[in-house]
Structure formats: structure tokens, C-alpha cells
Image (cartoon, rainbow, N blue to C red):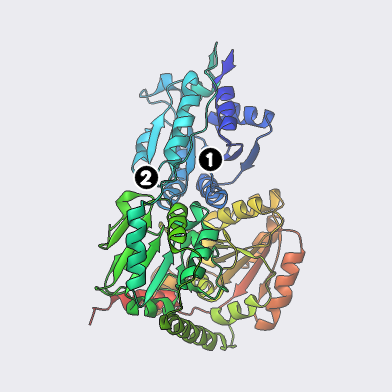
């Protein structure tokens, strides 16, 4: 006889899902014990949403599906925020929730809710497994749905009696579903080249599709053949590093005024694996000239021309499309356009304005001054887990993205606080690389108990908390006077870290930054730097205010 738990764990192994992010509960005891017997890597955390955030981050970092396993009832409902975050980020999270026994469903059983029904609106696919014999089929189906087309999150509810029940004959072994990588047609490639050659002020916007398609080498080769300026965003940050002569930094106009200015002047946009979403102002004339042409490459056909009409939509894997473009161009590089010098000048002007803000050395620290000092103290190869809020936005505007996969963000749901579980996954994926998490005092509170997880798993990453005793971005939006629900205490979060078993210290002045950062990375333990700052409206918040104003 074979139990459902054994079938599930064996199916997970066949699918390569040998790391489980979890928080234990009654529905999971059997399957977790079985996974431990088979030497799975089990990462047990302190909140179910942190579980699904960490699994989402693991999927993004490794470019493979990740498995989260939580208990039913409130364990399941707690997990939904992380699941929704993963789905909007196009991350192949397989979120499994235990549940009450199938025989007791609909009879006022303990923790009896329609879990698949609650998950269905926020995932690509959701189901409930009917019994132990079906667990391999349903887990494989979940995997296949997660990786098909534009990837995303899926949900599977497994009643506890499906784990504990047994079958006489195990079903056959699984085959792992393959992910398709459709190529662009020769006609599409030829049309794209014609549009690019006709343009006088073209730019490239590279998004997460470049990362998922592992197209970093192709993006670099294409840029160097064409001498086109490239802006990166989401998981593409660092794929073409910001210190490359053709990389113009962030494609987010809210954080890169040089990009905003260049976009307003450009006459053609080649958009690679990036939805024309809220980060790009939904393609509106506030950011993009109405007459500018668009060539969009995306693996998901529904994204093509969704918010902005395109002159050419190419439904293809980004790597395959770039290879087609490179092959068509051949080995002779295109001449540089005068436009490239203009774009570089815009970038220099923006850096000068950030440097001017950073010269404010008064106390409490201005975030720009802190990040300028921090930049010179960081070890090479640094990987970042970013949170939201004004403090983090200053950092994202000022620090360069130099490492592929090393710029982990919250995603389109803007799930503040997720930088901590994300950092846990980032450090687990890169145990020999320096990892820094950057957050604010408000955001840290959401998953603060995961400091315990970092300590238990001996993860020596550095946490930087910008402490302005409030919800800084919202305080700026409200106007600072007569504010409502935005004030916090100037808590000693370094002492909180020490209480969990890690280390930390407080930074009050610029001369303390470098030695504190050096101590943090040398400690070999989770280390929290509590940075006392003052509220200062970030470029992101300035952009938010500007977008409220009517178009002239």
C-alpha cells in the first residue's frame, strides 16, 4: 500500500520540486514527514504569506516552478496575498493548501471553506484533488499550467485524507512538462528590422521576459550590433548591467527622469518582454509621443497592443526573437546615431541632480545622502531585495543594477513587506554572494517574525531599514501636516533583530555608514542596520504628484 503523501512527494521529486516552503499545520504532518524522510529541503517559516512570497522569489530567481505548502483554513487565506503577488509577476508558483477531510466537506467541519474557489480569481488554474490516487496527476497538471505561455501561479487544495489515505497500486511515473519557446516568423523579423532602421530616435525597453527567456547574451549582442540605447525594468535589471555603455538604466520614468525625457523624444520603442502597464503609464501620451511607433515582443499574445496600439506585435519567446533579429542583421554593426549622445547627456543630467540631493549632510540623514555613502561601501557582486516606500525608491533611483537576477522587486501588486521573505529566498539561492535587503520601518512590520527564519537558517544577509518613524510615502502624499494614520515610533529595529538572535546597530551619521556596512557583511550572521533618516519626497513620489496634474 502507498499513501497519498508518498505519491505526492514522489511526484514532486519527478517534477524537480524538492524544496518546499511551508508553515506546518495539522493537514500537513503526514506529507512533511514523508518529504523529510526523502531528504527534501524544507524551509519552514513564520507566516503563510511569507511562505508564498519566498516560494515566488525562489521561482523568479531560479526560473523554475517553486512549491509552497500551507495548511488549510486561515493558513490558506493567509497565503493568498503571496499567491496573487506571484501571479501578477508571472512567477510559476505552485501553491498547495491542505484542507479538511473530503468526507467532511459541506458538513460544518473545522476549517471547511471553498479554498479552490477563493484562489481561482487570482491564479491561472485552481483545483481540489479528490483522493490519494489522483495526487500525481493533479500536481503534474498544476506544474503544466504554471509554465504554459505566460507563466503564473496555480493553486491545488489537497484534503488531509488524500494525504493520509492509501492505494494498492501506484500510478505510473510522471514526465515533466516542457515549456515551449515559440520563435518569431521571418516576416516579423524583417518588418521589425525595417522599422528600426527607419527610426532616428529608437529605444529598447527590456522587461522580465528577457530574464525568463535567459536572453541576456542575446540582448547584449543585439545592443552592441545596433548601438541602440537600452532601458531595463523588473527582472531585466542587471541583465544588461547599468555600467554597460549602451545601458541607460531604469526604464521606470518614475525613478529615472532621464528615461522619462528620452521617451518623450523617441520615435520608436522596441519593447522586449515587458507589459505596457502602470509602470509605463499604460502607454499614455504623458510618457510616449502619440506618433511614436511600437514594436512589442511578448510570449503572451494578449499583451500585444493591450494598452497601446503597436505597429508590430511579435508573439514569441524573447530569446528566440532576439536571435532572429541578430541573425538577420549579420556581423556588420550599425553606425551609431546622434541620438545616442543625446540619451547619454540626459542620463548625465539626471545623475547630477541626484548627486546634488546627496550633498545634504544634515541630520537626520537625507536618504539620498545615505545611499550615496552606501554605494561606496558595498562589496562587489551585491544582490538586492527591494521593498517599497520613499526610502527604497531613493535607493532604486541611485544604486546601479549590475548583476543578472540581483534586483528582486515586489511585483505589480506592490506587496510591501515582501522584501524580507524575498531576501531569504535570494540568499538561499546564492549562499556565497552578498545580499542586501532594503526596506522601510513600516514595511518591515508585515513579516518581522521572518527575522527568526533568517537566524534559524543562518542566512548572513544585511537588512537596511530606513527609519523615519512613519509611513513616509503616504505622509508625503498627505502633505505632512494634519496627517492621518501615518505616524509610527522610532523603534530600535536593530535591537529587535538582536532579540531574534541576529546582530545589528543604528546609524545616525554618514561617517558611521561604511564601518557599519563592513561589520555587517563580515559578521557572517543576519545583520540589521537601523538607519535614522528624515522623510524626503523621493523621485517616485514627485512623479506621483506630477501624474495627478492635468496634461497641458
Give coordinates of residue 77: x percent, y percent. Answer: 43, 42
Figure check: 473 above or below 343: above
Report the number of discs: 2
Quarter placement of the C terminus? bottom left
**Image quarter of residue 548:** bottom left
SS state under label 1: strand
Label 1 – label 2 distance at C-alpha:
16 Å
Extreme residue in the top direction: 168
Q: Position of residue 435 (x, y in %)?
A: 65, 61
Quadrant housing residue 523 = bottom right
**Callout 2 secondary element:** helix
**Residue 366 visible in the current orientation:** no
Q: Which residue is mark 1?
A: 68
- Where residue 196 sits: x, y (%)? 36, 69
Question: Would residue 163 be seen by someone viewing this image from the given angle?
Answer: yes
Q: Residues within 10 Å of mark 1 (few under 14, many from 20)?
A: many
Q: Which mark is residue 122?
A: 2
Mark 2 burial class by Cα count in 10 Å: few <14, some 14-19, many 20+: many
Nearer to the camera, 129 or 376 = 376
User: Camera-side residue: 240 or 103?
Assistant: 240
Does residue 254 appear left or right of residue 220 in this picture?
left
Residue 329 as seen in the image, left or right of residue 33: left
Q: Is residue 485 above or below residue 5?
A: below
Name the residue rendered at 44%, 40% in the picture.
146
Q: Quadrant of the N terminus?
A: top right
Q: Where, by quadrant of the figure, is residue 515 drawn?
A: bottom right
Of the residues under marks 1 and 2, which one precedes in the sequence?
Answer: 1
Report the residue at 56% width, 68% height from top.
241
Amino acid at each position: 500500500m502507498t499513501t497519498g503523501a508518498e505519491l505526492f512527494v514522489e511526484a514532486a521529486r519527478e517534477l524537480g520540486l524538492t524544496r518546499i516552503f511551508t508553515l506546518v499545520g495539522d493537514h500537513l504532518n503526514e506529507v512533511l514527514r514523508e518529504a523529510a524522510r526523502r531528504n527534501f529541503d524544507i524551509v519552514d517559516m513564520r507566516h503563510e504569506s511569507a511562505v508564498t512570497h519566498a516560494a515566488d522569489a525562489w521561482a523568479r530567481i531560479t526560473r523554475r516552478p517553486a512549491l509552497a505548502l500551507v495548511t488549510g483554513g486561515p493558513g490558506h487565506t493567509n497565503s493568498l496575498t503571496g499567491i496573487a503577488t506571484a501571479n501578477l509577476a508571472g512567477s510559476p508558483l505552485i501553491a498547495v493548501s491542505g484542507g479538511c477531510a473530503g468526507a467532511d466537506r459541506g458538513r460544518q467541519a473545522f476549517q471547511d471553506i471553498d479554498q479552490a474557489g477563493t484562489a481561482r480569481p487570482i491564479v491561472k488554474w485552481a483545483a481540489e484533488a479528490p483522493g490519494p490516487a489522483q495526487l500525481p496527476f493533479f500536481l503534474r497538471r498544476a506544474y503544466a499550467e504554471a509554465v504554459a505561455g505566460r507563466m503564473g501561479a496555480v493553486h491545488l487544495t489537497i484534503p488531509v485524507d488524500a494525504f493520509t489515505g492509501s492505494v494498492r497500486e501506484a500510478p505510473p511515473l510522471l514526465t515533466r512538462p516542457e515549456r515551449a519557446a515559440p520563435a518569431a516568423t521571418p516576416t516579423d523579423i524583417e518588418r521589425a528590422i525595417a522599422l528600426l532602421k527607419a527610426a532616428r530616435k529608437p529605444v529598447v525597453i527590456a522587461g522580465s521576459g528577457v530574464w525568463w527567456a535567459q536572453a541576456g547574451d542575446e540582448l547584449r549582442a543585439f545592443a552592441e550590433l545596433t548601438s541602440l540605447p537600452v532601458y531595463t525594468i523588473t527582472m531585466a535589471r542587471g541583465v544588461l548591467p547599468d555600467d554597460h555603455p549602451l545601458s541607460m538604466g531604469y526604464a521606470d520614468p518614475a525613478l529615472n527622469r532621464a528615461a522619462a525625457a528620452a521617451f518623450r523624444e523617441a520615435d520608436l520603442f522596441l519593447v522586449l518582454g515587458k507589459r505596457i502597464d502602470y509602470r509605463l503609464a499604460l502607454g499614455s501620451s504623458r510618457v510616449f509621443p502619440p506618433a511614436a511607433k511600437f514594436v512589442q515582443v511578448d510570449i503572451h499574445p494578449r499583451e500585444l497592443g493591450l494598452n497601446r496600439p503597436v505597429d508590430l506585435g511579435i508573439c514569441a519567446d524573447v530569446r528566440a526573437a532576439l536571435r532572429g533579429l541578430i541573425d538577420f542583421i549579420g556581423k556588420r554593426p550599425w553606425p551609431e546615431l546622434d541620438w545616442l549622445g543625446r540619451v547619454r547627456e540626459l542620463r548625465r543630467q539626471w545623475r547630477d541632480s541626484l548627486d546634488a540631493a546627496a550633498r545634504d549632510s544634515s541630520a537626520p540623514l537625507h536618504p539620498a545622502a545615505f545611499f550615496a555613502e552606501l554605494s561606496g561601501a558595498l562589496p562587489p557582486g551585491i544582490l538586492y531585495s527591494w521593498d517599497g516606500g520613499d526610502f527604497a525608491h531613493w535607493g532604486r533611483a541611485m544604486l546601479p543594477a549590475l548583476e543578472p537576477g540581483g534586483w528582486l522587486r515586489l511585483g505589480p501588486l506592490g506587496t510591501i513587506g515582501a522584501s524580507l521573505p524575498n531576501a531569504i529566498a535570494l540568499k538561499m539561492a546564492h549562499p556565497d554572494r552578498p545580499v542586501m535587503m532594503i526596506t522601510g520601518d513600516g514595511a518591515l512590520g508585515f513579516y518581522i517574525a521572518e527575522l527568526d527564519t533568517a537566524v534559524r537558517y543562518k542566512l548572513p544577509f544585511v537588512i537596511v531599514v530606513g527609519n523615519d518613524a512613519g509611513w513616509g510615502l503616504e505622509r508625503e502624499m498627505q502633505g505632512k501636516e494634519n496627517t492621518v494614520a501615518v505616524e509610527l515610533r522610532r523603534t530600535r529595529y536593530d535591537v529587535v533583530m538582536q532579540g531574534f538572535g541576529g546582530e545589528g546597530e543604528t546609524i545616525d551619521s554618514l561617517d558611521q555608514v561604511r564601518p557599519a556596512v563592513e561589520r555587517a557583511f563580515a559578521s557572517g550572521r543576519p545583520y540589521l542596520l537601523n538607519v535614522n533618516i528624515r522623510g524626503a519626497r523621493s523621485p517616485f513620489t514627485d512623479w506621483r504628484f506630477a501624474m495627478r496634474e492635468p496634461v497641458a
